[in-house]
Amino acid sequence: MPPTPPPPERESTFPPKGALPSKGALQPLLPGELARQVGEQANQAAARSRIADYRARRAEQTLRRQDSDLLLFREFLERVKVRTGDLSHDPGAWRVVTWGLVEAFIKWQLQAGYAIPSVNVRLSSVKTYARLAMQVGTLTPQEYALIRAVQGYTYREQARIDQRRPIKRIGLKKAEPIKITPEQAAALKQQPENPQGRRDTLLMCLLLDHGLRVGEVAALSVRDIDLGDMTLHFYRPKVSKEQVHRLSEATRNALQACIAAGELDANGLLLRRSKKNEELGEAGMTERAITGRVRFLGEKLGIAGLSAHDCRHFWATSAARHGTDPFSLQEAGGWSSLAMPRRYIEENKIANDGVKLE
């Protein structure tokens, strides 16, 4: 019986001893290596798309608020010499974030005078994007767990914290609002003819002619303006609804002046921060920046301590004096009940209007 021939030798996938592959030559991959490479590429693609997918599912107003929150967080990180990237879109920007930095961000806001509800909302935004960064492997699960454990403040804690603050809280309502005269309102809406002045004119028109809250103004983007019918579309967080306001004549003129000067970016925020030489930067105005600017513009006219809430009070008072009914005032002002609209109407009511003597 002839001997069984030996099985053919299996061809080695490794180069012969001493033989090196030429530079640039493609080498065959072992099944395990190929699987790891494909898996790694899939992970990278998923990481790039995870935040994009999340943002595609969210409302435009939500994204603007989150972007504003994360921009302030990034500014804080830069203050403490921590360099990072675009926290809203780049998961890699979260590699340097730790729970200690998030905790410090909360304390910094309190010292700077930010309102407790705003601090809590920003903490929620940070936790949301930290979770996305953990899901794509930028943050470790342990670090994310510690960030998630950072606590905000309850409504009951707010009064005690406000009493102990080293500086006055941003946006804290006065016991009595400053009463603005029609002449002062007209002057506030007439700022210098330069980029910063045109922006200030638009800002004051939005506050005095539409009664917007400071947070609502800060969140406005250019896309919220409908140039066809000259209306403003915006979100009222306190009543959780979107509203449409027809622009006043002064607001339309202010807007047209900014458009004619080429100072509005179609994809940017409506109000941008000031730079040197009365020019405007790329970043939008924060609530703090708007609060400070309104105070500054008021001081120029001799109105000490002017706030955005004082402008809202002027708007509501003017509406009541011109006969606006409480239901219309409630809707336009974004109040959750009729209590405040009725108060404005009662305060401006002429007691003997309905009296007939003959």
Image (cartoon, rainbow, N blue to C red):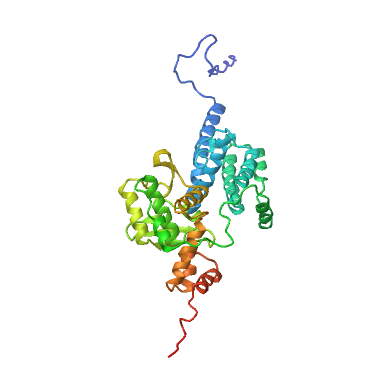
Residue extending farthest to the left is: 260
- Give residue 35's quadrant in the image: top right
Considering only vertical position in the picture, is 249 above or below 45? Answer: below
Q: Position of residue 261 (x, y in %)?
A: 31, 46
Q: Position of residue 127 (x, y in %)?
A: 60, 45
Considering only vertical position in the picture, is 134 above or below 227? Answer: above
- Give residue 132's quadrant in the image: top right
Inspect this view and state whether residue 59 appears: no
Q: Nearer the viewer, residue 164 or 105?
A: 164
Task: Tell me which residue sits at (66%, 45%) in the image.
Answer: 150
Residue extending farthest to the top is: 18
Considering only vertical position in the picture, is 268 above or below 16? Answer: below
Inspect this view and state whether residue 177 appears: yes
Considering only vertical position in the picture, is 27 above or below 93? Answer: above
Q: Nearer the viewer, residue 311 or 129?
A: 311
- Which quarter of the rendered picture does the N terminus lie within? top right
Residue extending farthest to the front is: 302
Task: Say how many tags the image has.
Answer: 0
Task: Tell me which residue sits at (58%, 15%) in the image.
Answer: 6
Q: Nearer the viewer, residue 299 or 266?
A: 299
- Give residue 33's quadrant in the image: top right
Q: Position of residue 230 (x, y in %)?
A: 34, 59
Q: Position of residue 43 (x, y in %)?
A: 54, 36
